Image (spheres, helix red, strand yellow):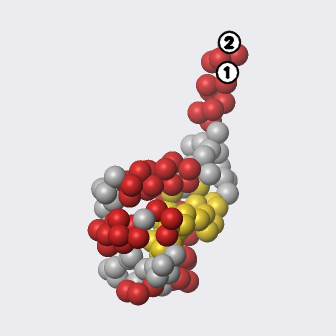
Amino acid sequence: MTDRKKLIKEYKQTLTPMGILQIKNLANGKILLMKAKNLPGIINSQKFSLSHGSHPNSELQKDYTRLGENNFFFEVLDHLEPKEGISYDYTGDLKALEQIWIEKLQPYGDRGYHTKR
């Protein structure tokens, strides 16, 4: 195997950082929590959609457009440690971790951008 192929294989088998992301409005303290199998990727995609006015959370988008990017902070609240390697499905683990943070921070109404289901 060539060095290039070996590096590509190693890269594909490397897990990206997973966990819980918080987008916080510094002007009013409201937050949006998100789970992600790829934290760097979701941070980039959230910043991109907010800066282009296309974020799916309309209330967050409205505040972001009105207040500007300097009033928002992106923070990783929790990391999910890999267990089983590349083939393990972390979806359930991430959902449980997200639920713990939602229960802890209660990001509803004046505290956040979530709606109760």
Q: Amino acid at mark 1?
A: Lys
- Residue 85 drawn at (x, y percent): 64, 45
Residue lying furthest bottom: 110
Residue drawn at point x = 67 percent, y = 24 percent:
7
Which numbered tag is attached to residue 28? none
Locate the N terminus and report the quarter of the image it occupies: top right
Above-or-below relation of 15 to 104: above
Residue drawn at point x = 59 percent, y = 33 percent:
12
Q: Foreground: 81 or 41?
A: 41
Which numbered tag is attached to residue 6? 1
Above-or-below relation of 6 to 77: above
SS for callout 2: loop
Q: Amino acid at mark 2?
A: Thr
Q: Foreground: 7 or 45?
A: 45
- Residue 17 drawn at (x, y percent): 62, 51
Residue drawn at point x = 55 percent, y = 63 percent:
74
Relative to residue 4, is residue 51 drawn left or right? left
* Measured Cα–Cα span from mark 2 to mark 1: 6 Å
Which numbered tag is attached to residue 2? 2
Q: Are marks 2 and 1 in contact (CB under 8 Å)?
A: yes
Q: Foreground: 7 or 52?
A: 52
- Residue 66 drawn at (x, y percent): 35, 70
